Amino acid sequence: MSTQENTVDSAAEEAGTVSAYRTYPVAPGYRLNVRSGPSTTAAVVRTLPAGSSVPIRCQRHGQRVRGPYGTSDIWDCIGSGQYVSDTYVRTGSDGFVAGPCGS
């Protein structure tokens, strides 16, 4: 198993997700804060290391953020009470790539 696959597996395990969720890479060179809600004022619950990939369980609108992949108010839920700004995740889309949270 490669280092990248280990990172994906450990991020998914820490997020409390199952392998059925598609994973997406975090922007190269970024350590990404995982927050308790869809805002930069929400508490940081952990920080993902550079080179991580994340499983996107669902997505929701929140605070507008500028990151390496543009500006957006979309936040990705990667585990129960764990959100990252979609602007730091390479999904290949400016819109939702997973269902909305809470539906």
Image (cartoon, rainbow, N blue to C red):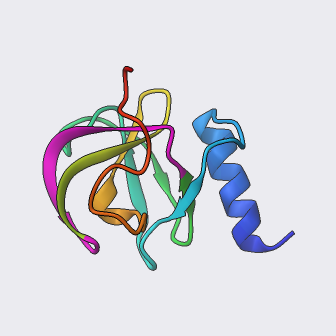
6 versus 39 height, above or below = below
Q: Is 60 colored magenta in this rendering?
A: yes
Q: Is 33 colored magenta in this rendering?
A: no
Identify the residue at image location x=67%, y=58%.
Answer: 8
Identify the residue at image location x=58%, y=38%.
Answer: 15
Identify the residue at image location x=37%, y=41%.
Answer: 83
Q: Main secondary structure of the magenta part?
A: strand
> Residue lying furthest left in this view?
64
> From the viewer's perspective, is 73 left or right of 22?
left
> From the viewer's perspective, is 26 left or right of 36?
right
Question: Where in the figure is residue 61, as x and y percent of width and height?
Answer: 21, 39
Q: Quadrant of the N terminus?
A: bottom right
Question: Where in the figure is residue 5, as x and y percent of width and height?
Answer: 74, 65
Question: Where in the figure is residue 88, as x and y percent of width and height?
Answer: 34, 64
> Residue lying furthest bottom in this view?
29
> Residue lying furthest right in this view?
1
Q: Quadrant of the C terminus?
A: top left
- Quarter of image, res 14: top right
84 versus 35 height, above or below = below
Q: Nearer the viewer, residue 43 or 58?
A: 58
> From the viewer's perspective, is 91 left or right of 95?
right
- Residues shaded magenta: 55-69
Q: Nearer the viewer, residue 38 or 48?
A: 38
Question: Where in the figure is residue 29, as x and y percent of width and height?
Answer: 44, 79
Count up the numbered dots. Answer: 0
